[in-house]
Image: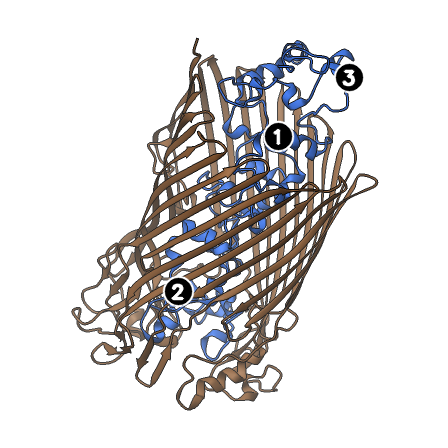
Chain colours: A brown, B blue
């Protein structure tokens, strides 16, 4: 007879909340509020068929549903829906109307700057910076014709909301203008994979297609600095992400070889395209509020192609050797339009960036006497890119991992990795060299000292050690330590040193059928050091640009900054099975805390400044504490009652936000920012 | 079937049940114990199809004998345990690249329990299961700025394939950017004005598991930006406590969203003229 079985759980929860202070921070990815919500989990089986349904947070803006079913060994399908809320700031404000649309405007006069702006009290539009993703997906897997398989899935995700953007005005000496950017995105995805899978041989071909649509590709706004007196004047514009389409075709394969070896390959080709109508004017501080520019093509067609080839050979010819050799080649080709822009005296083209990477390496897992396993590895990576300062980098990475499990109750691991990055610096050639090459001359005087950290030559050492102890069946202890140090050895201006220390600890202990305890502690200390030069003039001379040139004035001086962050988090919890299988009490406390410091050292101090009072001690300082208590009573075999209480406290202090002002003026009355609270 | 008949080598499932009652009960409820599932161990010799022939073990009153595999025991060689799992599961796209991944050294039973009936037979749900070994990631995810991993909206397996991939760190893509763009498709561009480090690797500026800085930035702005953009005028300025809201000369280059108070399109821009070039439109 057929065995049919339906089982599952339905949970209905009532929640009463009391939130004070910054609601957005506590609710960043959640939807905490008074009311009821539910969870459902149902499973049905019948003679080889199965059907599962899961719903969580039903009734909230974080709800999700997943339905899957099929016939074992033949086919499977699923349908799912998920909502993700992301809250940034509640009750933000702006003097603009039209928030959420592609046109922001205001009535009356907003001062361009100066003392008048300091006294300006705009009427405000109140809004929330928040976004919401809603994703609906479905898929089908066919295994009926094994070893052949077919997987298909589609999804649509919509993302709507507001995030902060900005439009600075009057060049670098002007003010920042923060604006709410509307999000109205849609992304459709199709995945298709078919293949053949046996133990000895695997081959598949897959297609990934993704289409992104943005309903609002430009944010028009009336900028107080430009077209100040006429709301109908040509507005200022911020360009937003353009529509794009992306497809990728991949071939993957693996074949078993003699000597317990396997050869694996992955070939991928992709194309990403976009299209944007370009603006033929820029807002400017001129009578008309804008000035015309000339473009060689009013439409920009973006096109990026990529090729990827991976080949990996794994081999385990004898039990004491486990080897892997790999080669990877990746190339990104930029086939976008190269457009010539003429803006007054400036004539320039957009730079078409592309790059390729070649990576080859090997690792050898060696079983040694005394329950030791040693895995030395080496990797060589060469990057070539269309970039002025470092068109090429070579990385040599050496590593060794050692594992020992010589006793029943302990596994110990130690590891070391050394990365040596090399590269030859070149002088960059500016897109806009300036009249009389004045900008290029400046570049020639500054750039020789600058090494950008993403490409700068460096040495990095990483040490790590960990112990996993399990002295008894009911006690587990884990301890780990990692030290990482990066030395950007050729850098004069820029990031010179980066280091971190991490400690991780956890323990769990079970006391028979009475209780279960667990605790963890994580500690991290990071430090970075950067050395910079103030160059408050343009153009500059070679001597002014030289950090060792001996020129020391209020406009030309060196400064350095050491930033440090100490972050620790810990938690402990206990489950007490007061009446086994009847009444369980759960308690849990978690805390995460970070303490930062920006320690400046300036070669030139202004009146009133000392090397100590310029530092910032509230540097992303925060602490979050969570306490939870829960009692679960299994009233009958099919009914459980839960009563819970949770307390959360979040504290945040940062020098960049303390004393927040929507319109900040300096001591001289100059407006610096029109902010919204983001 | 030799398995079920209790031959000289195999004891048969009923013999196992006599001593391992709890294990037999949980196994019977699991997918592996479901006879409706083609190829399940229930159709292939029950317990001994995974644990190995147990006749000698039974004859010796439960003594440990060579050739039998005990899952969940850390001291048993992972390869030996995995061989049992792979004998059925290797012929699938999920495990086609298992031998390339680092997890082959920890063994299937570190994460899966063959007797469980939960989702994918996992011993715990993500991310807690992954934190068992990756404690440093737990530390990152607890930080102020994080993907909604703790909140259950993003899971480790959304980005990583624990069963082996061609990508580094078991990432499910050929490059970091390709992975990030799967959720952040608006960042794909292609833009007329590109920010080169962005185009090459999102991780030049972002750290994916958690950060003390907003937006998962690896360093705090504006200093992160200044580390590359030391230049004449404002990019090279030393913005100290004097330039904060509470300072004597508040500066838009330091307060609130600092550089992004003007340079809003740092991921790329199709803006006009030099304003697009400088990512301010």
Say if residue A496 shows up in the picture.
Answer: no
Place residue B138 in its image quadrant. Answer: top right
Of A611 and B120, which appears nearest the observer? B120
Label 3 and label 2 in one chain:
yes
Dot in front, 3 or 2 = 3
Of A7 and A334, which appears nearest the observer? A334
- Residue sitting farthest toward the right: A369
Q: State the separation of the CA atoms marked 3 and 2.
A: 67 Å
Mark 2, residue position: B268
Q: Earlier in the sequence, mark 1 or mark 2?
A: 1
Q: State the separation of the CA atoms marked 1 and 2.
A: 49 Å
Of A49 and A265, which appears nearest the observer? A265
Query: What residue do we see at 51% from left, 55% from top?
Result: B175
What kind of element bears circle 1? helix
Mark identifier at residue B87: 1
Whether residue A257 sits left or right of residue A427 in the image: it is: right
Q: Residue A469 at x, y = what percent?
A: 73, 35
Mark 3, residue position: B63
The answer to whether residue B59 is above or below residue A450 is above
Disc 1 vs disc 3: Cβ atoms closer than 8 Å? no
Disc 3 vs disc 2: Cβ atoms closer than 8 Å? no
């Amino acid at each position: 007879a057929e065995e049919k079985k339906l089982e599952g759980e339905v949970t209905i929860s009532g929640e009463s909340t009391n939130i004070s202070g910054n609601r957005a921070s506590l609710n960043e990815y959640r939807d905490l509020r008074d009311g009821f919500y539910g969870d459902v989990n149902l499973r049905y089986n019948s003679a080889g068929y199965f059907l599962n349904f899961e719903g969580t947070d039903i009734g909230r803006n974080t709800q999700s549903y997943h339905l899957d079913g099929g016939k074992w060994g033949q086919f499977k399908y699923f349908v799912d829906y998920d909502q993700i809320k992301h809250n940034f700031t509640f009750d933000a404000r702006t003097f603009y109307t039209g928030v959420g649309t592609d046109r922001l405007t205001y009535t009356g006069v907003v001062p361009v700057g100066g003392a008048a702006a300091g006294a300006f009290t705009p009427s405000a539009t109140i809004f929330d910076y928040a976004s919401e993703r809603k994703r609906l997906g479905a898929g089908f897997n066919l295994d009926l014709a094994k070893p052949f398989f077919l997987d298909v899935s589609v999804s649509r995700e919509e993302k709507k909301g507001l995030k902060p953007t900005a439009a600075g005005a009057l060049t670098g000496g002007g003010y920042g203008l923060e604006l709410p950017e509307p999000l109205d995105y849609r992304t459709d995805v199709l995945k298709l994979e078919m293949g053949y899978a046996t133990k000895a041989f695997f081959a598949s071909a897959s297609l990934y297609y993704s289409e992104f649509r943005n309903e609002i590709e430009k944010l028009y706004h009336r900028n107080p600095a430009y077209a100040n007196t006429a709301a109908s004047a040509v507005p200022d514009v911020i360009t937003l992400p353009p529509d794009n389409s992306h497809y990728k075709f991949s071939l993957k394969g693996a074949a078993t070889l003699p000597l317990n070896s396997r050869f694996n390959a992955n070939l991928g080709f992709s194309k990403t395209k976009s299209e944007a109508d370009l603006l033929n004017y820029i807002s400017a501080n001129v009578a008309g509020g804008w000035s015309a520019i000339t473009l060689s093509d009013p439409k920009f067609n973006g096109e990026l192609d990529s090729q990827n080839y991976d080949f990996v050979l794994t081999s385990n010819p004898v039990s004491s050797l486990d080897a892997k050799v790999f080669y990877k080649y990746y190339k990104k080709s930029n086939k976008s339009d190269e457009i010539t822009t003429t803006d007054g005296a400036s004539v320039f083209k957009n730079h078409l960036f592309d790059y390729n990477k070649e990576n080859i390496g090997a690792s050898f897992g060696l079983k040694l006497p005394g329950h030791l396993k040693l895995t030395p590895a080496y990797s060589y990576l060469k990057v070539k890119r269309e970039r002025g300062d470092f068109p090429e980098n070579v990385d040599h990475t050496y590593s060794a991992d050692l594992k020992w499990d010589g006793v029943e109750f302990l596994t110990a691991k130690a590891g070391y990795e050394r990365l040596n990055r090399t590269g030859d610096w070149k002088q960059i050639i500016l897109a806009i060299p300036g009249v009389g090459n004045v900008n290029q001359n400046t570049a020639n005087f500054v750039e020789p000292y600058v090494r950008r950290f993403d490409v700068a030559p460096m040495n990095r050492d990483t040490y790590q050690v960990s112990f996993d102890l399990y002295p008894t069946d009911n006690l587990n202890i884990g301890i780990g330590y990692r030290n990482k140090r990066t030395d950007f050895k050729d850098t004069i201006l820029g990031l010179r040193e980066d280091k971190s220390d991490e400690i991780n600890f956890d323990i769990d202990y079970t006391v028979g059928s009475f209780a279960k305890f667990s605790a963890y502690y994580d500690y991290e200390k990071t430090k970075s050091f950067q050395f910079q030069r103030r160059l408050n003039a343009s153009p500059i001379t070679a001597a002014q640009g030289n950090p060792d040139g001996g020129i020391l004035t209020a406009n030309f001086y060196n400064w350095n900054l050491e930033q440090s962050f100490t972050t620790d988090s810990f938690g402990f919890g206990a489950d007490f099975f007061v009446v086994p299988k009847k009444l369980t009490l759960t308690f849990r406390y978690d805390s995460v805390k970070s303490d930062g410091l920006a320690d400046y050292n300036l070669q030139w101090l202004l009146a009133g400044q000392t090397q100590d009072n310029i530092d910032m001690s509230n540097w992303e300082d925060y602490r979050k504490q969570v306490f939870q208590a829960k009692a679960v009573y299994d009233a009958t075999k099919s009914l459980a009652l839960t009563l819970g209480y949770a307390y959360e406290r979040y504290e945040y202090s940062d020098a960049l936000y303390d004393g927040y002002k929507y319109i900040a003026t300096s001591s001289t009355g100059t407006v610096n920012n029109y902010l919204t609270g983001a | 079937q030799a398995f079920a008949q209790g031959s000289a080598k195999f004891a048969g499932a009923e013999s196992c049940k006599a001593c391992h009652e709890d294990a037999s009960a949980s196994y019977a409820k699991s997918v592996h114990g479901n006879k409706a599932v083609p190829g399940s161990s229930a159709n292939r010799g029950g317990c001994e199809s995974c644990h190995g022939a147990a006749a000698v073990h039974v004859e010796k009153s439960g003594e440990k004998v060579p050739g039998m595999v005990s899952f969940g025991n850390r001291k048993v060689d992972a390869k030996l345990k995995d061989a049992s799992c792979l004998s059925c599961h290797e012929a699938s796209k999920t495990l086609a690249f298992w031998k390339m991944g680092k997890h082959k050294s920890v063994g299937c039973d570190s994460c899966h329990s063959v007797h469980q009936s939960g989702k994918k037979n996992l011993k715990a749900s993500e991310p807690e299961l992954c934190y068992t070994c990756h404690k440093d990631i737990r530390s990152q995810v607890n930080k102020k700025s994080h993907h909604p991993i703790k909140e259950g909206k993003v899971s480790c397996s959304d980005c990583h394939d624990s069963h082996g991939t061609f990508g580094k760190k078991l990432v499910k893509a050929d490059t970091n950017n390709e992975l990030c763009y799967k959720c952040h498709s608006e960042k794909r561009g292609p833009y007329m004005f590109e920010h080169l480090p962005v185009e090459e690797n999102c991780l030049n500026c972002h750290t994916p598991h958690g950060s003390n800085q907003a937006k998962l930035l690896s360093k705090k702005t504006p200093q992160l930006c200044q580390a590359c953009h030391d230049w004449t005028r404002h990019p090279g300025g030393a913005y100290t406590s004097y330039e904060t809201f509470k300072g004597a000369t508040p500066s838009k280059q330091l307060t609130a969203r600092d550089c992004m108070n003007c340079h809003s399109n740092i991921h790329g821009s199709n803006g006009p003229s030099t304003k697009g070039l400088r990512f301010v439109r």
